[in-house]
Amino acid sequence: MTTQTAENGTTAPSPEEETAYLVILTLQRPTLFGFRVVTCKFTAWATPDTSRDDLLELAMTRLSKRWRKGNISFFYAEPDRLGGTA
């Protein structure tokens, strides 16, 4: 999988990539006073051989290290197109 990050924080396609995916990841981790929750949302450009696990790993790298051991409570990765064709 090849991805590039644009200046605005979204991932931009390299020439061989074709599909944009909306990726949302929500994690929670315990604290002394309960739980903390964080959500990461971005658009990733991926090649046809990219798996959902690849997109999950990409989302995890966007979080600080302390969050990477959190419990995944929600993960979403679907093509970022609303009907129709290009």
Image (cartoon, grey):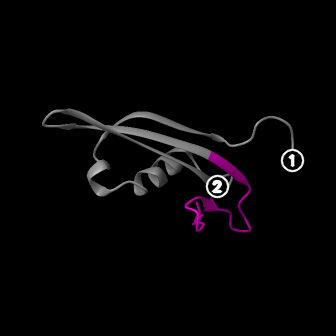
Q: Nearer the viewer, residue 85 or 54?
A: 85
In this rendering, is residue 11 above or below 53? below
Please provide percent x and percent y for residue 17.
71, 60
Give the magenta range: 1-21
Q: Nearer the viewer, residue 78 or 52?
A: 78
Decide: marks 1, 2 in contact (CB < 8 A)?
no
Label 1: how many residues lie within 10 Å, few (<14), some (14-19) or many (20+)?
few
Answer with the quarter of the image where residue 45 lies.
bottom right
Q: Is residue 30 magenta?
A: no
Report which residue position mark 1 lands on. Answer: 86
In this rendering, is residue 47 above or below 6? above
* Left/right of residue 29 with respect to residue 31 in the rendered view: right
Please provide percent x and percent y for residue 30.
21, 36
Count the marks: 2
Report which residue position mark 2 lands on. Answer: 46
- Give the residue at x 56% y 50%: 42
The amino acid on which the numbered mark 2 sits, given as a three-letter code, is: Ala
Answer with the quarter of the image where residue 28 lies.
top left
Q: Main secondary structure of the magenta part?
A: loop
* Left/right of residue 13 with respect to residue 8 in the rendered view: right
* Mark carried by residue 44: none
Which residue is outermost to the right? 85
Q: Is residue 3 magenta?
A: yes
Q: Earlier in the sequence, mark 1 or mark 2?
A: 2
- Give the residue at x 46% y 51%: 59
The amino acid on which the numbered mark 1 sits, given as a three-letter code, is: Ala
The residues tagged by marks 1 and 2 sit, at their Cα atoms, a distance apart of 17 Å
Answer with the quarter of the image where residue 37 lies.
top left
- Give the residue at x 41% y 51%: 60
Closer to the eye: label 1 or 2: 1
Quadrant occupied by the N terminus? bottom right
